Amino acid sequence: MQEEKKIGILFEILTSEQQTLQRADQKAFTMLSLMGVFAVFFIVHYSKIPPTVLTFILIFFYFISVLTAIFFLVSVVSPRIKETEDISKDKKTILPTFFGGIVKYKSAEDYAESLGTILNDNEMTYKIFSKSVYSIARINSYKHKFLKYGIRAFVFAIAIEFSIIVMLYLNLLLIEYP
């Protein structure tokens, strides 16, 4: 396969991985926003909740699940990825495709010169962009794992909140219509 065709395929994969990364971030932000809306709704009804052992247990699990969901969703937005052995032993190579690699250059001219050298060598270009695709795929894997956990905790929190609200209104109905 021609080197240009290989590089073109890598660019398509890189673009797809970057879009997947953005979608994971958007989902996490959306979930965090929804949690805020539901928390306000919960706070509005909190004073009306009858103090029973069951409601205390439900509220306790509600707050635990909300905090868990927040932790996982923030982990999606701000991932903490450890370097693999392959990347860490090849520290000499600065990845010019990530902002972290770009800012390691002393100036824009140094970056342009290095990028030009890399782009003139098809094999090196392929190797650098392969590392970039691999790195983004690892980040995507991390983000989606934590997004999955965050969604589960969010759904659990909302289920508890709805059960508390249903219990509240059932209690109000029993008080008004004994």
Image (cartoon, helix red, strand yellow):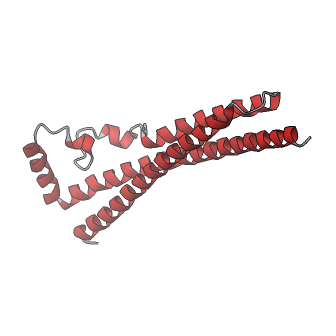
Image vertical order of residue 9 relative to residue 165, above or below: below
Left or right position of 70 against 49: left
Residue 93 in view in this figure: no
Image vertical order of residue 58 relative to residue 113, above or below: above
x 37%, y 48%: residue:
135
Considering every residue shown, the one lying at the far right of the view is 178
Considering every residue shown, the one lying at the far front of the view is 176
The quadrant of the rendering that contains the N terminus is: bottom left
Q: Position of residue 169 (x, y in %)?
A: 78, 43
Left or right position of 140 against 170: left
Task: Specify the quadrant of the image occupied by residue 9.
Answer: bottom left
Residue 120 in view in this figure: yes
Q: Position of residue 125 (x, y in %)?
A: 22, 57
Image vertical order of residue 126 relative to residue 165, above or below: below
Task: Specify the quadrant of the image occupied by residue 49.
Answer: top right
The quadrant of the rendering that contains the C terminus is: top right
Task: Specify the quadrant of the image occupied by residue 149.
Answer: top right
Q: Position of residue 79 (x, y in %)?
A: 43, 40
x 40%, y 53%: residue:
22
Q: Position of residue 141 (x, y in %)?
A: 48, 49
Of 154 and 78, the residue lying toward us: 154
